[in-house]
Amino acid sequence: MNNSILRVITGWILGLIALACIIFGGLPLLILLAIITFLASKEFVQILEHKGFYPSLKVIVVADVIFAILAYFNCFNLVPLAFTAGTMIAFMWVLFKGKQPYTANVATTIVGFVYSGWFPLHLLFLRDLGTTNNTSSLQMILKTDFMNAGLGYVIFMFLLVICTDVGCYYFGRKFGKHKLAPVVSPNKTIEGSIGGAVCALVGGFIIAYFIKLPWYHTIIAGLLVTTFAQIGDLCESLLKRDAGVKDSGNLLPGHGGFLDRTDSYVFTIPVIYYYFLYFVVDTHHWVDLLSFIKGIF
């Protein structure tokens, strides 16, 4: 079958599965993220092994499981404990089981459970924004209160990332002349990057109308999404180029690996979650920020 057709079919299947899990939220979304983070973590380890680094997949997966449980039950106050434990376990693994280079293996293990686990698992926090507390114990476990503000925020972010990717591709092909990051990704251009940002903002205003997001939040959130989507893409390209590999894996026909398909979301998800949390849902942080800026000047 033609590679382009395979790419389209795979993209549609993945998109429909992701959309269903996002709409239902809760347990289906947790299961989807658990699968993605495990496969992405495995690909991350394999990429680094090409460079002679040997992070522990077992430590990364254990940390990802802990982060997933904390994220699912919104136990944000326990995250520092999880990070502390994960870091100590990474050191102990190298101490008793690891091999050279020891320091690099500890560092890449920690980066692994942050990059391929903790960052994307913020999607559970984002999806739960606006969830009411008037729920039964069973609802708290199954997360059946799925028609909340978080659903709109997640759809907003995902569609803007898609708009960014499409805009970067078409504007880059049509008008691209100046390289954006020639060493990391020679095909990406400044014109394509700007086109991606324009498409994201246009798409953002359309989506914002349906989720009742004010225009100023639409602009700021839109710029954050398109900026960090492109940064995430470039960072994964950096990892692959440094390791001398073309794709992170070959599990997805026409797309490469899971890291190849989720790279634009890795940084975007936590950034947009904290923006919506601190400046849209919990609006008193605007006052704190203005007071801080006023104190500086």
Image (tube, rainbow, N blue to C red):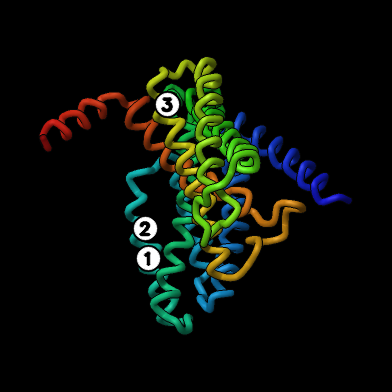
Residue at position x 63%, y 67% from top? 245
* Residue type (three-letter) at the residue carrying disc 1: Thr
In x, y percent, where is residue 43?
61, 63
Indicate whether 100 appears above or below 220: below
Residue at position x 71%, y 35% from top? 16
Residue 45, by quadrant, is: bottom right
In x, y percent, where is residue 46?
60, 69
Residue at position x 42%, y 80% from top? 102
Number of residues whose C-alpha sits closer than 10 Å to that of mark 1, classed few (under 14), some (14–19) or many (20 or more):
many
Tell me the residue that label 2 is attached to.
83
Q: Secondary structure at mark 3?
A: helix
Indicate whether 194 appears above or below 87: above
Number of residues whose C-alpha sits closer than 10 Å to that of mark 2, classed few (under 14), some (14–19) or many (20 or more):
some
- Which mark is first along the chain, 2 or 3? 2
* Residue type (three-letter) at the residue carrying disc 3: Ile
Tell me the residue that label 1 is attached to.
87
- Residue nearest the observer in this picture, 171 or 207: 171
Label 3 vs label 1, nearer the camera: 3
Tell me the residue that label 3 is attached to.
219
- Which mark is first along the chain, 1 or 3? 1
Q: What whole-number distance in Å separates the C-alpha atoms at marks 3 and 1?
A: 37 Å
Number of residues whose C-alpha sits closer than 10 Å to that of mark 3, classed few (under 14), some (14–19) or many (20 or more):
some
Residue 103, by quadrant, is: bottom left
Residues marked 1 and 2 touching at CB (< 8 Å): yes
Q: Secondary structure at mark 2?
A: helix
Q: Secondary structure at mark 1?
A: helix
Q: From the viewer's perspective, tell me whether residue 176 is left or right of residue 102.
A: right
Which quadrant is the C terminus positioned in? top left
